[in-house]
């Protein structure tokens, strides 16, 4: 790896899991490896409440884009690993700030340090001052100023026991819990908005969500089927491994139409869908159904 970058992958809710924390961390690390499996040379490490990814510089942006689809991640930053030397950290910061100053003319910035290595001789505030003053000395004439509360650019430094990371941007993640940590459920997926949204909500809470679609081409044509296949493909970007089951429903719908009261049709359609979905969920070891319904919904 000629020129590498370090991905700093943060999580928040997992940190509250107590004795089960290691299980959730391992599950998240496994999902991250799966999301990045097509990118050559990626190494994932767990270090002091963080997950680090070692990647080639040219692949860093692609890795971040993929990780924004992984539930359980709070944010991702692209940084560099370097010695805890004030001059080197400031030099790196100047290289990041200079292009922004050239475009904007003026820029407010600050330095924020997190020091988990308490043996390091300088405090976080002292590091902020030392690095920030060096950056100001190199760029103040261009219109750079310090504003801790309303900074337009933040240079972040993390000084750990093994290495020091410097980075400048936090890309937000989905948060939540890693997929697979909360069992698996079955979603009654349709072409509307409610069922895919509720499916994504369950994925973000750590469920592996499989889907079932009740196909009725006799009444609706092929359009509904094609749309659901596309939706299932999109939802799988957030979890991987989700299956779509297609149930032919036209014969049941025709029988209800021909032999049951018009006033009961919708209720009977739903009843049969739920019965079939329950049987499928039990056979596939799914612990619940996702319907996408809400209280007071008109349907």
Image (spheres, rainbow, N blue to C red):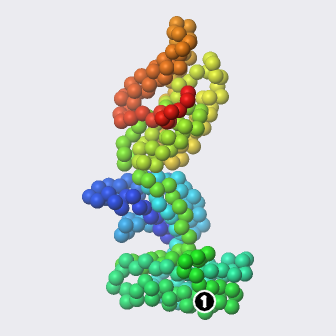
Residue 64 pos. (x, y %): 55, 61
The correct choice, above or below, for 169 with respect to 298 in the image is below
Residue 233 pos. (x, y %): 56, 40
215 relative to 22 in the view: left or right? right
Query: In percent of the image, x 40 and y 66: which residue is there?
Result: 50
Residue farthest top in this picture? 259
Query: In percent of the image, x 56 and y 12: which residue is there?
Result: 262
Q: 175 or 262, which lies in front?
A: 262
Q: Is residue 244 visible?
A: no
Residue farthest front in this picture? 296
Question: For residue 143, what is the image quadrant?
Answer: bottom right
The correct choice, above or below, for 218 with respect to 50 in the image is above
The correct choice, above or below, for 15 with respect to 290 in the image is below
218 relative to 176 in the view: left or right? right
The correct choice, above or below, for 164 with respect to 55 in the image is below
Q: Residues within 10 Å of mark 1 (few under 14, many from 20)?
A: some
Residue 75 pos. (x, y %): 49, 63
Mark 1 secondary-structure assignment: helix
Q: 220 or 26, which lies in front?
A: 220
Residue 210 pos. (x, y %): 46, 36
Query: In percent of the image, x 60 and y 66: which residue is there?
Result: 58
Q: Residue tagged by mark 1? A: 136
């Amino acid at each position: 790896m000629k020129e590498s970058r370090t991905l700093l992958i943060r999580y928040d809710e997992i940190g509250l899991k107590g004795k089960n924390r290691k299980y959730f961390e391992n599950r998240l690390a496994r999902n991250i490896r799966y999301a990045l499996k097509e990118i050559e040379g990626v190494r994932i490490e767990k270090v002091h409440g963080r997950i680090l990814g070692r990647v080639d510089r040219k692949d860093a942006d692609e890795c971040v884009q993929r990780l924004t689809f992984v539930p359980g991640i709070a944010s991702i930053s692209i940084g560099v690993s370097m010695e805890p030397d004030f001059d080197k950290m400031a030099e790196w910061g100047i290289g990041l700030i200079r292009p922004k100053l050239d475009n904007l003319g003026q820029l407010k910035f600050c330095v924020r340090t997190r020091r988990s290595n308490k043996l390091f001789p300088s405090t976080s505030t002292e590091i902020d001052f030392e690095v920030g003053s060096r950056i100001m000395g190199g760029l103040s004439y261009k219109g750079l100023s310090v504003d801790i509360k309303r900074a337009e650019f933040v240079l972040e430094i993390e000084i750990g026991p093994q290495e020091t990371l410097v980075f400048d941007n936090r890309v937000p993640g989905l948060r939540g819990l890693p997929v697979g940590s909360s069992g698996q459920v079955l979603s009654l997926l349709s072409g509307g908005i409610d069922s895919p949204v509720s499916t994504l909500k369950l994925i973000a809470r750590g469920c592996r969500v499989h889907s079932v679609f009740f196909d009725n081409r006799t009444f609706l044509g092929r359009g509904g089927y094609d749309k659901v296949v596309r939706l299932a493909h999109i939802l799988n970007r957030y979890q991987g491994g989700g299956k779509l089951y297609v149930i032919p429903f036209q014969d049941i719908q025709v029988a209800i139409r021909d032999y049951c009261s018009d006033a009961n049709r919708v209720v009977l359609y739903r009843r049969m869908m739920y019965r079939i979905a329950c049987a499928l969920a039990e056979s596939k070891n799914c612990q619940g159904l996702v319907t996408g319904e809400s209280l007071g919904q008109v349907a």
